[in-house]
Image (cartoon, helix red, strand yellow):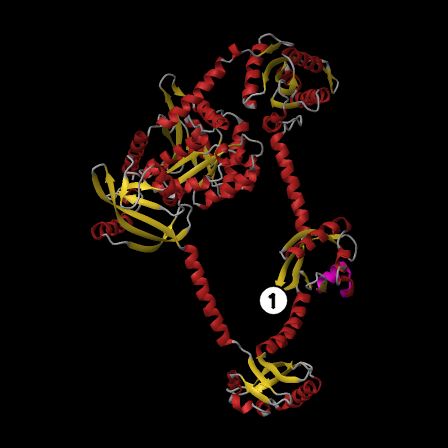
Amino acid sequence: MQRTSFENQLTFDADFEAILNAIPQPIIVKDEHFRFLFLNDAACMLIGRARCDLIGHTDYHILPTAEADRYRDMDIGVLSTGEEVSVEEPIAVPGGDVRRLVTRKSRAILTRGSSSEKVIVAIVLDVTECRTAEAALQASVEHHRSLTELHPQVPWTADPSGEVLEIGPRWEKTGYAPKEALGAGWAKAMHPDDLDEVQREWAKSLATGEPLDVEFRLAAAEGGYSWYRSRAATRRAEDGSILRWYGTVEDIDDRRKMFEALKESEARFRAIADDAPVMIWVTGENGADDYHSRLWLETTGQTAEQAAGKGWLNAVHPDDRNAVERVFYQAFDLREPVRMEYRLKRAGGGSAWVIDIGQPRFASDGTFLGFVGIALDITARRNAEQERLLAQKQIHHMARHDAVTGLPNRQFLREEFERLSDQIAPGTRIAILCLDLDGFKAINDAYGRATGDLLLRHVAERLRNFLKQSDMICRLSGDEFVVLRVGINSNAEARLLAQQLIDVIEAPYELAGTHVDLQVVVGLAAASKSDQSLDELIKTADIALERAKTGGGGTIVQYEPKMDADLRARQRMKVSLRHALAKGELEVRYQPLANLRTGQITTFEALARWPHPERGQVSPAEFIAVAEETGLIGPLGEWILRQACTEAVKWPPYVSVAVNLSPLQFRNQRLASTVRNILEDTGLDASRLQLEITESVLLDECDSNLQTLKEIRRLGVIVAIDDFGTGYSSLSYLRTFPFDKIKVDRSFIADLPKSKESLAIVRAVAAIGRSLGIITTVEGVERQDQLDTIKAEGFDEAQGYLFGGPLPASQAMALLKSRSEISAAER
């Protein structure tokens, strides 16, 4: 912007711009076309925009049209008349605060070389504090006036002899005029039963000069009597003689009635508290307990006198006493609610767990009165909670440890590695050793699974006894173990460890009188501390292990970069999958599920497919695993769900769509909200959406995942358990969550109807479904004899290539149409 000057007013150069920027009030200059020519720093801060974003623009660039129109009309008036305009209005400033601002606009002349133009200069003043102070002052004046007019006390004065000289106008409430109360006339309004007492107290004060303080009843203009309190004191001369009495008459009728009601309420409270099923206690303002209900006394064996003050602490279990005392008195000092759990000594012996909740009590004027609280016996609940925590601990342990050997599994190893990775000393290395028991399968086949399991436990015991406490070990699969050691200094040290492990494991075993020999092969990977995940490190050791297996027992192979062609290919797939998802290159296919009683297609299962431009169709088992590794499973799963719901809306209303959820999607706490939003966006009825999960959803972080499942089911969505029968404890999950559908894994169908074992299993699942009212579905039906078998066993639905494979959306729609036409023809 070229430096110019404002004619007759100011010179607009660098120095003057600096001066304007130093002014705390916002200053804005606009040209004849209402564009911003200059804004000082305060104006930019007020608007919340940088100066470079505003120069050359108009109000329409930063304000709603209606508001910009209003400012444009104001600017037009300033330019045309030259008159200064001032407007005050509330303005929302950046940050959300609303300030009252006064904007003063005037016209000036801006000279550019030999030409000049009219400009508008606006100065903004913040009067928020001023207006707030004015409002507060006005409120204070009104408040004082109201207090004066509504004050309930009646002032009065009397001479040294006690004759009333003047009295306030509110005396009229007695039904007598104020002038009638002068002298001793006030006695006419007094209740006859109170008059003698009041006159004695008044005479005593007159004789001694002591202040008067007496309560009595006065007549009420509307009839009856009300309670009042009169207080008076003297004004004395220098010689001590009384010059005048000054007093007030205060209406205390409500207070007296409240006092009487309080006494009645206290009696009623004690009666209720003593019959309550909880222990009730009350303290005074000094913190000492002054009341305990009957249940407290019966539970602890204390008397009311023993529990008073701090005596109640003697009933608290000695191990809890100091903590209870500290928490309670901290809450007392802060005047805050208190909540604590502790044990009480029972009168008959033993202890009781209680939850003690106390609330501070305050008078209407804010005066602290003490605490009131209740103590509830929660012994049974605590016992149940301990049992639940123990069960959760056991489940957590089972989910992270191998059931046969008791060794940690991959999940546990992953968590420990993440926890300890930051503690690895700089300059040292990590050694990952994958151990495979060469010949274990032959031993297991020859001597049976029980002997095989016993052998695995012996191997695990030897590893535990040999390895350092800082080493990490887990059983990955049937005969594969992983050992991780941090802090090694060389590859030679890692190879020495591998050889020592071979020597330890290959020593002969005596198992229930059976002599057994094992051989071991080791895949070794040694790496510096890096950002690689544990799974990637184990993968490199696994690559070396595959090489070691070709060399036979006792072979050690250390990983070399040239071995990781497969690993690099997987990394490329991760990148490729990310691009494919971003570009919409994935597809959704739909495989039909048929009702076995009607033969009608009732559901399509949505299955993701990836037609890779170079590799052709990529197996879902491959790219879904990659998506789970890379964190893409969330957006991929949401995309599949949205595509499936969008397509299902086009189908007949009796046809549903089934979508698989990965266990990793449950890490998203908003999964249920995502499902609800997609249903709302696509317009699909929730009852037509089926979400299929595997049992690992309930095994991993089951409390959180179970809550998410409940939220999804409350939407009206059908929830199915997939691959039923292949997991750790499938039957227990039917009790954990009310599934709507069971999908029997295809592994139980492949050898039907010949296999008696498979037939017994599917028959049992069908019976479970009927007894629990759960829909039963069979996967992998490819032959007519399989279909005949599952029909005979009473299954509800079937899925497999006998009914159709995964189809593009258009073919799925065509299949529905043809099936509908066939059904119509048959009818």
Judged from this view, the residue extending furthest toward the top is: 551
Does 680 sit left or right of 309 as displayed?
A: left
Q: In terms of secondary structure, what is the magenta stretch mainly?
A: helix
Residue under numbered circle 1: 363
Q: Secondary structure at mark 1?
A: loop
Q: Is residue 789 above or below residue 153?
A: above
Q: Residue at x 67, y 44 (%)?
A: 386
Vertical relation: 257 (above or below) 184 = above
Residue at the image point whose x is 25% and y is 54% from the top: 83
The residue at 64%/75% (across/down) is 264
- Find residue 793 and report its horizontal and vertical position in percent: 48, 35
Indicate yes or no whether the magenta region holds residue 298: yes
Q: Residue 191: x and y, percent?
A: 60, 89
- Taking the image as shown, residue 679 lies to the left or right of residue 194, namely left
> Is residue 508 at least partly visible in the picture?
yes
| Front-lying residue, 440 or 756 | 440
Part of the protein shown in magenta? 292-304
Identity of the residue drawn at 54% across and 91% down: 180
Residue 68 against residue 187 in the figure, above or below:
above
Depth order, front residue of 824/650:
650
**Membership of 187 in magenta stretch:** no
Q: Quadrant of residue 53?
A: top left
Can residue 175 be seen at all in this image of the molecule?
A: no
Q: Amino acid at mark 1?
A: Ala
Quarter placement of the N terminus: top left
Nearest the viewer among 199 and 376 is: 199
| Crowd rating for badge 1 (residues with CA inside 10 Å; few <14, some 14–19, many 20+) | few
- Name above or below for residue 626 compared with residue 366: above
Q: Which residue is situated farthest in the front direction here?
A: 8
Residue 686 horizontal/vertical position (percent): 40, 43
Rendering quarter of residue 436: top right
